[in-house]
């Protein structure tokens, strides 16, 4: 079974339904797609693939929030869930990332890839930033300010 193709198809179907105003069915398709991305993430041994699957799921949550609105009691439409996920994915505080980014060409390959992952994650999170959904405790503006300095 090609689980990635199935997940991508569920995602596409969800977006089509949500954009057509069929919120209940669209939400079910998004939840199905997220479950498939979570399954793929849990089965992968490659850290980059895991992050890619997680980012795909986060993008779906952001799509749901943009269409259905924020609902902190619903994990699908919870900005706090996205913030927690971002914080769990960071192994360094922002000041360490800024320092590493300033000399990234001198870093080992693994560190450069880590900084690149942070940049990819921030690109996904920017989709909600214009709507001012993030809490101040995450320092999200500071993270977005350093995004362009990352490799």
Image: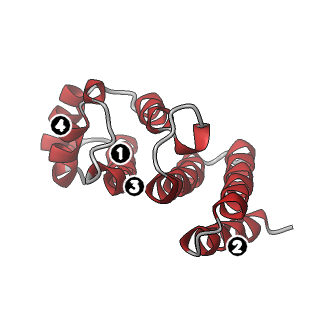
Closer to the chain start, of discs 4 and 1, is: 1
Q: Which residue is mark 2?
A: 9
Q: Which residue is mark 4?
A: 142
At which x and y percent is residue 120? 37, 54
Q: Which residue is mark 1?
A: 118
User: What is the quadrant of the N terminus in the image?
Assistant: bottom right
Tell which tag, 1 or 3, sits nearer the viewer: 3
User: What is the quadrant of the C terminus in the image?
Assistant: bottom left
At which x and y percent is residue 14? 65, 67
Closer to the chain start, of discs 4 and 2, is: 2
Decide which of 58, 100 is in the foreground and name it.
Answer: 58
Q: CA distance from mark 3 to mark 4?
A: 16 Å
Q: Residues within 10 Å of mark 4 (few under 14, many from 20)?
A: few
Q: What residue is shown at x 59% (from left), y 53% (from top)?
A: 53
Q: CA distance from mark 3 to mark 2?
A: 20 Å
Element under disc 4? helix
Q: Which residue is mark 3?
A: 124
Q: CA distance from mark 4 to mark 2?
A: 35 Å
Q: CA distance from mark 1 to mark 2?
A: 27 Å
Closer to the chain start, of discs 1 and 3, is: 1
Q: Give yes or no for contact between labels 1 and 2 (Cβ–Cβ under 8 Å).
A: no
Relative vertical location of residue 108 with respect to residue 16 in this rendering, above or below: above
At which x and y percent is residue 26? 67, 63
């Amino acid at each position: 079974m090609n689980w990635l193709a199935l997940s991508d198809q569920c995602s596409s179907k969800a977006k089509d339904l949500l954009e057509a105003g069929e919120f209940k069915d669209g939400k079910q398709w998004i939840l199905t797609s997220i479950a498939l991305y979570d399954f793929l993430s849990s089965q992968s041994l490659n850290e980059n693939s895991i992050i890619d699957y997680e980012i795909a799921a986060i993008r779906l949550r952001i799509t749901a929030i943009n269409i259905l609105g924020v609902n902190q009691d619903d994990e699908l439409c919870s900005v706090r869930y996205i913030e927690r996920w971002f914080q769990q994915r960071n192994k360094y505080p922002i000041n360490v990332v800024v320092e590493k980014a300033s000399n990234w060409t001198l870093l080992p390959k693994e560190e450069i890839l880590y900084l690149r992952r942070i940049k990819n994650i921030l690109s996904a999170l920017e989709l909600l930033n214009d709507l001012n959904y993030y809490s101040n405790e995450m320092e999200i503006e500071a993270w977005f300010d350093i995004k362009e300095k990352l490799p």
